[in-house]
Image: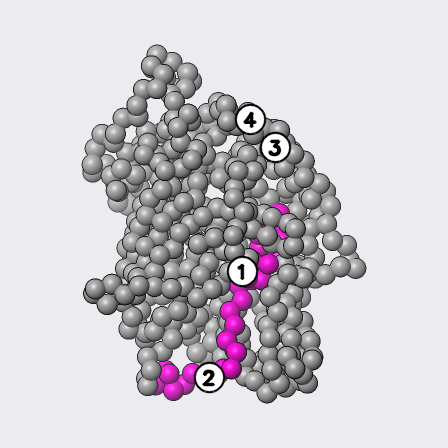
Amino acid sequence: MASQETGEVAKGSQTQPAASTSPKAGPDEQPTAQRNGAAQAGEPEQPPASAAGPIILEAGSYRPETYRQLAAGGGNVVFVRRRQPKPAYPWRRAFAPLAVLVAALLVMVAVLSFGLGSTLASGGSATSGGGTSPDQSATMSGMSNMNTSSQDANATATVAALPRATQSQGNQLATYVRDPDGAKHFTLVAEQVLWEVVKGTWVPAYTINGTVPGPMIRVTAGDHVRITFINHFHEATSIHWHGLEVPSQQDGVPGIGQQPIQPGQSYVYDFTVHDQDVGTHWYHSHYNDLNEIAGGCYGAFIVDPRPGSPQARAEVHADVDYTAFIGTLPGGYYVINGKSFPDTQPLHVKHGQTVRLRLIGADTLTTHPMHLHGHTFTVIAQDGHPLPQPYQRDTLEVAPGETYDLVFTAWAAPGSIYPFHCHILSHLMNPGQNESEMGGLVMLVIYDR
Ligand SMILES: [Cu+2]
């Protein structure tokens, strides 16, 4: 598999794996006049020439310095330029009117919004006939870190073809099967879908198993964990286990421990979680991160202590245990668990309960000072690790990559409702909203009767 990846990328002008299962394959794979004027139409793609070639990494999809350093150090890494656009394909012409409509809608949203939303204008106003490869064109529109306008245009075409998500909430507990060697075996599938960020508004998302966030992996210290990761994105990806002390080759960083997982291919991660891994962690894309993480490609990875261990005895007993990812989605939406207010899931509590709130900073660009009305909470852990001196707050800044565990007592009367929200007030609006409306990073703590 590894040599196949290398060979495919090494072809340079080829933009899709020859044996790809992508629906975009087929007519797109005909040699073009630009790159192969004398070729016969329908000439089959050649298989990789060598089974042990160097690792070839594409500029623009990751920090170039990283790859240059790798090439300088190891000598077995080749750094290539991003592929040139190919001419438009017939199917894209067929999609063009739809793409223009989507582009027009994106421009409207951009004009009505502010902040991140303003970057949509450049994405949406580009023409739609550029024709880069499907894996490049999977780049989502609406983010502040777009590379080129032609990519934006093709992202628009790809977005138009994405299926809608069939599930409405993420963070569901992941299921697993027991392998003969005792490992808990999970299967994660990377899928690009349209995700309903707020009622009636669907945005392109990079999901795991079709939801934002992806499923929550919850295991116990000492568990042997195996994860089959299948890439159905239109571009390469990889998954990093953020906060876990795993071997380098399981760490999910392309160019260091593995090669990027190409579209249609899969990769098996295999590691054991230990006592030092107990706590609130997460997994996320580590390839084209500025698009993939900002497109929702992440999920919780929670490790519970071994029953009866000192760590278990030190655990806070919580009646309610809730995990909240704080991030963004394309189009300038600030989201908690993939939803903007008023469609964020409320946190339901009962008077007298102890509530544990696990916060995970999944934004790629900025921190969020999260404030809880009506309560003082105790911060008991940071990045999964128990704090030697827990401290009390009502506002806690959550930076990209951080996790915090908060505990509070639900002291108030049944029927009470309190907001939990970011205190950067521009993060409390959705694109197109005015100051009299509330959106974005707000969720409600609701006291059930
Ligand atoms: Cu914020």
Residue 316, numbered circle? 2
The residues tagged by marks 3 and 2 sit, at their Cα atoms, a distance apart of 53 Å
Q: What residue is drawn where x is 50% and y is 23%?
A: 90
The residues tagged by marks 3 and 4 sit, at their Cα atoms, a distance apart of 8 Å
The residue segment tinted magenta is 310-339
Q: Which residue is mark 1?
A: 169
Q: Name the residue type under label 1.
A: Gln
The residues tagged by marks 1 and 2 sit, at their Cα atoms, a distance apart of 27 Å
Q: Name the residue type under label 3.
A: Leu
Nearer-the-camera pick, 135 or 71: 135
The residues tagged by marks 4 and 1 sit, at their Cα atoms, a distance apart of 33 Å
Q: Which residue is mark 4?
A: 94
Residue 8's place in the image compared with 389, above or below, is above
Nearer-the-camera pick, 412 or 373: 412
Q: Please check the rendered image and state whether residue 131 is part of the magenta-colored stretch, yes or no.
A: no
Count the numbered circles shown.
4
Give the class, few, some or many, for how many residues have Cα within 10 Å of label 4's Cα (few <14, many ≥20).
Answer: few
Instruction: Give the quarter of the image for residue 447.
Output: bottom right
First reached walking from the N terminus: tag 3 or tag 2: 3
- Tag 3 and tag 2, C-beta contact below 8 Å: no
Q: What residue is drawn where x is 62% and y is 85%?
A: 351
Tell which residue pokes out farthest to the front in this image: 166
Q: Name the residue type under label 2.
A: Val
Give the class, few, some or many, for how many residues have Cα within 10 Å of label 2's Cα (few <14, many ≥20).
Answer: few
The residues tagged by marks 1 and 3 sit, at their Cα atoms, a distance apart of 28 Å
Q: What residue is drawn where x is 43% and y is 78%?
A: 386
Disc 2, SS: loop
Residue 343 appears left or right of 215: right
